[in-house]
Amino acid sequence: MRLEAIDISFRYDNGNRKIINNLSMHMDKDERLGITAPSGFGKTTLCKILAGYEKPDSGAVLLDGKQLFAYKGYCPVQMVWQHPELSVNPRFRLKEVLKEGDRVEKHVIEGLGIEPDWLERYPSEVSGGELQRFCIARALGQGTRFLLADEISTMLDLITQSQIWNFLMEEITLRGIGLMVVSHSEGLLKRVCTRRINLDQLGVKQ
Amino acid sequence: MKQWNSRKTMYCFFVLSIIFLAVVTVIGYFSYDKAMVVDFSRKNLPPSFSYPFGTDWMGRDMFARTMTGISMSIMLGVLAAAVSSVIAFSLGIIGASMGKAADGFVSGLIDLVMGIPHILLLVLISFALGKGFKGVVTGIAITHWTSLARLIRGEVLQLKESQYIKIAEKLGHGKLKTAVKHMTPHLLPQVLVGFVLLFPHAILHEAGITFLGFGLPPEQPAVGIILSEGMKYLTMGSWWLALFPGLLLTIVVVLFHLVGDILGRLIDPGRIHQ
Amino acid sequence: MLEERKKILSIKNLSVSFSQYEGAFRWKNLLAIKDLSLDVKEGEMVAVVGSSGSGKSLLAHSVLGILPYNATRNGEISFYGETLTEKRMRELRGKEIVLVPQSVSYLDPLMKTGLQIRKGKKDESSRQKSLEVLKCYGLERDTENLYPFELSGGMIRRILISTAVMEQPRLVIADEPTPGLHIDIARRVLSHFREIADEGAGVLLIIHDLELAVEVADRIVVLYAGTNLEEARASDFLEENRLRHPYTRALYRAMPDNGFSAEPGTQPYAENRPDGCTYAPRCEYVQEKCLKEVEYRNFQGGMVRCIMAGGEIR
């Protein structure tokens, strides 16, 4: 299975600044791809396009040769965002957050170190690191084929960071999920990724 | 830890207010017949033990009349406020989630209704529907939904842009499921508080237009009628005819307002530890 | 080596507790910070490092006297040897002690940045001074005519710092100045704080990113579950066995360059914080003595709250 971006360009409605300019890239399901770029390059925007949150102005995103937005229902490309506190409904208990996902397996929940007594809490009652574990678990439902991680551990302490990444690497290898990692941390990318690209050398323009 | 605190005080106040309002409603409901009895042998009596609010120029028991009037106002208020909230909720959601055309229509409607002075619109509607209970309820219901509808529309627009709603879509949840599961928990408290705060408005407007003669029919013991009749006798020294009904009306309105306010505070997570 | 310098800020046995409602009616007292001590000397940059929930922001708020309404503070905070009362904090706040807040929301969106930097003063000397400050942070002259929404994240942080240093404070408290910034810009922002310290003021840096803190600060205070477990020189983080506490060592080993190993477990919440050492439930060296109060003591040029610190743990 392969996720491809073919010659995509993108700009936001409210500005004439072009964020992505004729970019092409691809990744396979057994890859762990690391993305780096200088400040102001549209890394988050790229993730949003690849996960189907935004449609590119031109070009196409293909999953297995088929247009990504032609997949209805659960999107096989899931994205985990940088700020977990914005990614969960503040009025949901955390167990309901897990239920939002596609039949998230018990070993994922346990593997991420989610403790049973957190499930009854509301998002504001746990720390950012704990909340991010829920966001990751939710994105690792049965239908997930690719996982895009946009700076998911910048806000976390080192131990939580390595707990999460060690689990993620094991889990995606086991299930054959492709992983894309956006991070500024050289050390982290070196540890996690099998291939690296620098957006600076591709068609992403400020 | 068993200790008195301000939150408990709020709860007590809340419960007591509701009990008070309920009791007034029930007493009023059952003293309707008593309120209609005319007895010229006891006319124009000042307040006493047997007639705590005195009697009027036809010897009618003012306590019974006031209670009946207030109770009718409350029931009318509940009905009008409920209808109003439902209109506001539906229009707010439709406006925000059914595309540009629907939004334009709803916003236009809100501006239109808000643009007309609402006492005027109320009088017109009530008059057109032949006055009476139906006229008043309809009038109040279709003039009072605007600000709540605007609030809800704004809230839905904001929610639609939030990250977690977009994530829910990508997790394969349909539009309807997202609206019901994700949005209602945010909107319900607003609607509830809006509903309670509509009460005092509804009651005051009912009393207002009845006082002006466009509301409930004159034979009804309604607060507006009691007050307008009482006014004629004020100069003759029968102060109790207007004072007690007026005072009770004020108390009821203030209580509803406080109930709404407390409710808002109790369910506002930002002030949860106050 | 910094002994002869004057102490600007000294915090002794600080504790902060919250009274809050549990469910609808029950009052509960929650100890968020427990027995925390540290000091900042002239020309020194002290980083307070901890994950979210460790109490590091509360520490900053206690020094400034801006704790939330339901919090109570105990212990002693002094500024140049003088005990800080709430009243004194109010007098010093914004003049001698300044906070560099973490987000944009602290800037007035309707006011040009130049005017915000000089706090609304319009005279020529303030203007000259504000232009100098802008220049010194590598911002263009005409930045003063821009509104906050026209600035990037890195520029906003620099504006916030400019606003703070206009008053030439003795103590600068920086509350998480880096999240959301690209790493190069984050480094640049931190280097500005380093300059402030090098010019003689004290800087208390509240930060969650240990790797960045080590690059820039003189001393690192490690917070965990509301109390400090260790105070180390930044250079101690070059080698695992120079660190004193098992938790700090676990942090060291979790760095991607130092093994990326993941110690299991999570930081306990304030309501179920253990009585003795807060790290005891996760610590591999835990003994019976760890379950009672553990003293915060001097150890090998730093401080540690562990009964068997340093060389004995491997």
Image (spheres, rainbow, N blue to C red):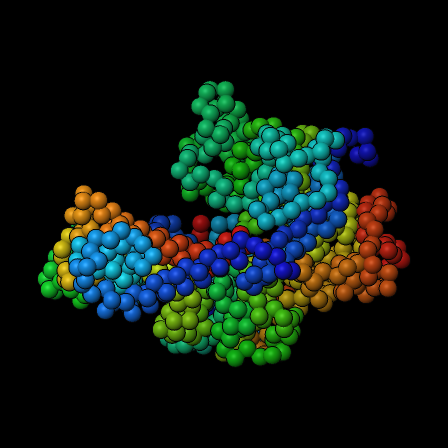
Viewer-closest of B7 and A200: B7
Up the image or down, C229 lies above or below C43; here it is below
Residue B107 lies left or right of residue C68; in this view the side is left
Which quadrant of the figure has residue A61? bottom left
Q: Residue furthest front?
A: B41
Rendered residue at 53%/24% (across/down): C129
Instruction: Please say whether residue C178 is visible from this viewpoint.
Output: no
Which quadrant of the figure has residue C254? bottom right
Rendered residue at 48%/50% (across/down): A40
- If the image is split into quadrants, where does the N terminus of chain B sit? bottom right
Position in image of residue B147 (x %, y %) = 29, 55
Up the image or down, B264 lies above or below B178; here it is above
Instruction: Please say whether residue C139 is visible from this viewpoint.
Output: yes
Residue B171 lies left or right of residue B125; in this view the side is right
Rendered residue at 77%/47% (across/down): C231
Viewer-closest of C262 and A43: C262
Residue C310 lies left or right of residue C203; in this view the side is right
Position in image of residue A118 (x %, y %) = 61, 68
Position in image of residue B251 (x %, y %) = 34, 53
Viewer-closest of C178 and B81: B81
Q: Residue furthest top?
A: C124
